Amino acid sequence: MSQASKQQEKTFTGKVGFVLASVGAAIGLGAIWKFPYMAGAEGGAAFLLPYIIFSFTLAFGLLLTEITLGKAGKGGIVTAYRNLGGPFWSVLGYLGIIIGFVVLSFYSVVGGWCLLYFFEAIIGFPSADPETLGALFGSLSSSPWVAISAQVGFLALVGFVVAFGIRGGIELCSKILMPMLFIFMIILIITGLMQPGAMKGVEYLFLPDFSKFSWKTLLDSMGLVFFSFSVGAGCMITYGAYIDDKTELVSSTFWIVVLSLLISLMAGLMILPANFAFGMDPAAGPGLTFITMPVIFAKLPFGYLFSIVFFFCLIIAALTSAVSMLEIDITWMVQELNMKRATAVTVCLLFMLILSIPCALSFGLLADYKIFGKTAFDLADFFVSNLGLPIGGIIACLLAAWFAWDKVHTHWTSLQNYPGWKKVLRVCIGILCPALVLAVLISGLMN
């Protein structure tokens, strides 16, 4: 292979490949799993409205910032920060490397649950009784061998995709799985909407009842936007480094926000109308996916097939997001430690597995071992959601707006003739986004 061909393999083929890969990184389980139960618990449309507003302001600003930093800095988070801001900023970039490891330490546990429930759907759930299904979830998550085996299986899938590189692995996977996810979700949505009483769920999701709106709703919607779009860790900086010169950044970021938001809305339509149709509690919380949905599928025509499709969708969401997190650390090992990609993937996954075992055992053997009142799983989740991602987002915004602005804004080719919009974006990125992220950070620490 020629040097030019090797270089091409290190970039996305174009805008479509980059956008699909980025949407896969952004949606994750935040859209498919977390958005429906949070919307169900916090008033439906009263939660959705601020979620949409924050998606087109906070998420857009942070995504554009990270993507541009990667493009302008010509590397992953550590390399890009050094190239744009100097040695001090490269040290701050290591926070993203740490976040990548910690995220996968507990995210791979949930990914393992998705695999387990996919196989449970294939063999058939033992009962449609919520208590029985709750006991099933408890037995699967608390069994050391089952939990760790599922986690290993999920990490092996992630490593398999990343090992094939940008075009042959991440982009190809996204081009296949993202359209599949859309198609499967549409099938499930249509089936759910055909059930008597389902339109009450649609009204709940789209007709605001402002009596249910509160300051907590505002903060929680902002926090979920931050979590759902995978900003703050540096995965979008990594993907930005692999963009070719023909891909326009502003419009690409806009499409990432639109498609990611669309999948969240589709997830709500996939789950909430079916809940109302069968008299289930839309505020069931995290158990909505693993306990409530199997009950609903048992009552649906062809529910057996739909349950398989549903949990396959969860695997797709978990896989595409986990791939982006692993790529943060693989890019660092390749660029900074001069490792070959295959070696980096092997070393990284072995280290990741060792780090993540305590999280997998947090629901069984290590359930009573706590630090600051939290299990290893909860502590990792808290560090990422309440500390790592918000701080990482603030660092990226400050670097882009106030320390590397001249190197950043020149990459927004569609805005070259609109300097006023660049000033607006600078205020948004340098002031508004850090202020909103700081609000999420303080709120999370207080809670």
Image (cartoon, rainbow, N blue to C red):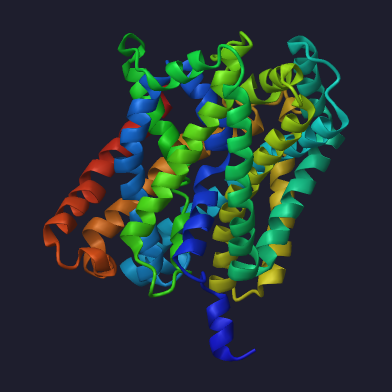
Question: Which of 370/390 is in front?
Answer: 390
Quick one: 282 or 389, which is closer to the camera? 282
Kindly identify the residue that appears in the image at 58 percent across and 63 percent down.
Answer: 171
Question: Residue 349 is drawn in which quadrant?
Answer: bottom right
Q: Position of residue 195 (x, y in %)?
A: 61, 17
Q: Name the quadrant containing residue 193.
A: top right
If the image is split into quadrants, where does the C terminus sit? top left
Q: Please indicate, yes or no, whether residue 373 appears anywhere in the rendered image.
A: no
Looking at the picture, tell me which residue is in the foreground, 35 or 135. Answer: 35
* Residue pictured at 56% horizontal, 55% vertical: 324
- The percent position of residue 308, horizontal first and vertical second, equals 76, 35
The front one of 284 and 256 is 256
Q: Residue at x 21, y 45 (%)?
A: 431
Is residue 202 among what the camera can see? yes
Q: Is residue 387 above or below residue 291?
A: below
Q: Classify residue 145 as left or right of residue 31.
A: right
Given the current orientation, which residue lies at the most extreme left position? Answer: 420
Q: Residue at x 22, y 58 (%)?
A: 402
